[in-house]
Amino acid sequence: MLHMNVMTGKFVFFKGSRYWVFREADLEPGYPQELFHYGQGIPTDRIETAIWWEPAGHTYFFRGNQYWRFKEETRLVDEGYPKPVSVWNGIPASIKGAFLSEDGEYTYFYKGTQYWKLDNAKLQVEKGYPKSIVKDFMGCTVYWSPDVDTDSNPDGGKGADEDPTVNGDSSHEDGKEEEDEEKDKEIDVVVKVNDRDDHVLTLVLITVPLVLILCILGVIYVIISTLQNKETPKLLVHCKRSLQEWV
């Protein structure tokens, strides 16, 4: 959990019974330290949420269903604290984070995937809250079916009363499983090929053999032509014989 100390301008991270102090992205020497070093009167086992609440000029620590008002100057918790979180009308216990609006008129508390908008002047949560963090802050669309309770029943909404095995009808369930297996085996897989792809494939199958045949014929023609050029001309042979006889 992150908290900014307005007195020092440093960031304070809380986890379990310890805290870390950062100046921007650099961890200050000597940290982490135990919570009891941070100040007197604050919870020392864990802090779930901390916020500098500008309307009052104090730091507030939240844990479970209680909160503490803390003075940064004296490092002491004010007298009369902790108090119940119910003072902040409408926010739940065990809040995991909080921050002020830019104008300082509202405080946003969040927990899990929900958030609450508190009017600082009335100390009252606005109507219509909590709302979805995922939808409002992250721009995601959430589809939720109220008929399916996946947390309480991971089997998709079927209760124990609807389970045939609970009522003792296990033979019906076994028969249904065998039937489903047979259906799975009989599934036909159909691959649809585009007509344009058929034409292209046919053209390739025809063109490639023709090109190969032409290449083979060309090679044969070159070989025959070469052999013919290597033979001695008949006229020249006749002349050689005639010259020998003449000499």
Image (tube, rainbow, N blue to C red):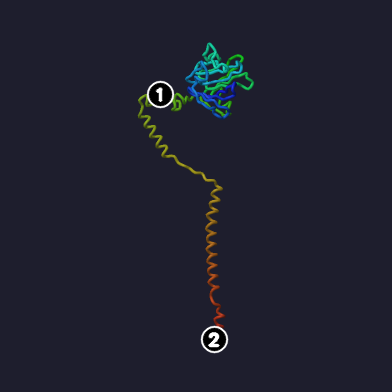
In the rendered view, would you say 2 is above or below 204? above
Mark 1 sits on what residue? Answer: 160
Q: Residue at x 55, y 51 (%)?
A: 200
Q: Nearer the viewer, mark 2 or mark 1?
A: 2
Rendered position, 233 above or below 245: above
Cα–Cα gap, marks 2 and 1: 120 Å
Labelled disc at residue 117: none
Disc 1: CA contacts within 10 A as few (<14), some (14-19) or many (>=20)? few
Residue at position x 54%, y 73% from top? 230
Characterize the local packing of mark 2: few (<14), some (14-19) or many (20 or more) Cα atoms within 10 angstroms: few
Tell me if label 2 and label 1 are in contact, CB under 8 Å: no
- Residue 34, percent from left and from top: 49, 22
For label 2, the residue is 244
Q: Nearer the viewer, residue 89 or 99?
A: 99
Dot 2 or dot 1: first in sequence order is 1
In depth, the one of 77 and 135 nearer the eye is 77
Quadrant in the rendering for residue 58: top right
| Residue 52, image x, y percentages | 58, 19
Most distant residue in the front direction: 29
Task: Classify 124 as above or below 13.
Answer: above
Task: Report the number of numbered marks.
Answer: 2
For mark 1, give the secondary structure: helix
Task: Tell me the residue at 52%/66% (across/down).
Answer: 220
Type of amino acid under label 2: Gln
User: Residue 186: where, in percent of width, then height?
Assistant: 42, 39
**Is disc 2 placed on a helix, strand or loop?**
helix
Q: Name the spot of residue 56 as percent of width and height, x first.
A: 60, 15
Most extreme residue toward the right, as rendered? Answer: 103
Camera-side residue of 161 and 108: 108
Disc 1 marks a residue whose amino acid type is Ala
Work out which quarter of the rendered image holds the C terminus and state it: bottom right
